[in-house]
Amino acid sequence: MQVNIFSFSWEHFSSNKVISITMMTMIGEITILDRHAPLISAFKPSTMFVVYNDENWVPYRNDFAIWAWVIEVRDSKVKILTDMLIDVEDQKDLDKDVIELAKNEALALMEKYKSSKDRVDMEKFIEAEDALLKSIAQLKLYEVRK
């Protein structure tokens, strides 16, 4: 199965030897295998793993933290477009202290916006919620790496 994963930061994964992809969509976890029925779906910020054969045809699993966007499956070809794609092997993006700090800052901002006596600025609240969800996906990936 051919798989191409693109992120807006130009990081990507590509392989034509993919066995399966497992990820969380808006309706639940799915696993995509070769000859999967056509599908277009949004997915949740979460971890995703891809099982593929390496150059010696040995099965290998690669885990990623992904951020919401869209997946398309058609004719044994899978295209994934995401805002964030972090590989489990990426040391610079998986610093637990930095991720925890970002998570706590997002939680504090959300609480500030929620308990504000004025009207809640929904745009800022959603930005804080997005930062929280990204941090949670990164922490899940960090746990996979351990």
Image (spheres, helix red, strand yellow):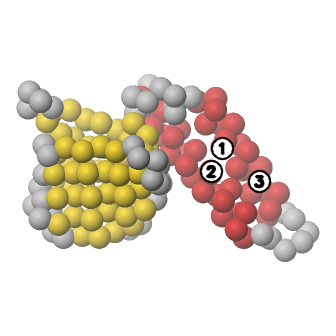
Q: Residue 132, labelled with which disc?
A: 2
Determine the CA span between mark 3 and mark 2: 10 Å
- Mark closer to the chain start, 1 or 2: 1
User: Residue sitting at 20 percent across and 32 percent down?
Assistant: 60
Spot occupied by residue 44 in the image (x, y as percentages of width and height):
45, 59
Spot occupied by residue 120 in the image (x, y as percentages of width and height):
80, 70
Q: Amino acid at mark 2?
A: Leu
Q: Are marks 1 and 3 in contact (CB under 8 Å)?
A: no
Q: State the residue lying farthest toward the right.
A: 117
User: Residue sitting at 84 percent across and 74 percent down?
Assistant: 119
Secondary structure found at label 3: helix
Q: Are marks 1 and 2 in contact (CB under 8 Å)?
A: yes
Most foreground residue, 68 or 16: 16
Q: Quadrant of residue 88?
A: top left
Q: Residue 114, labelled with which disc?
A: none
Determine the CA span between mark 1 and mark 2: 5 Å
- The quarter of the rendered structure image containing the C terminus is top left
Residue occupied by mark 3: 109
Secondary structure found at label 2: helix
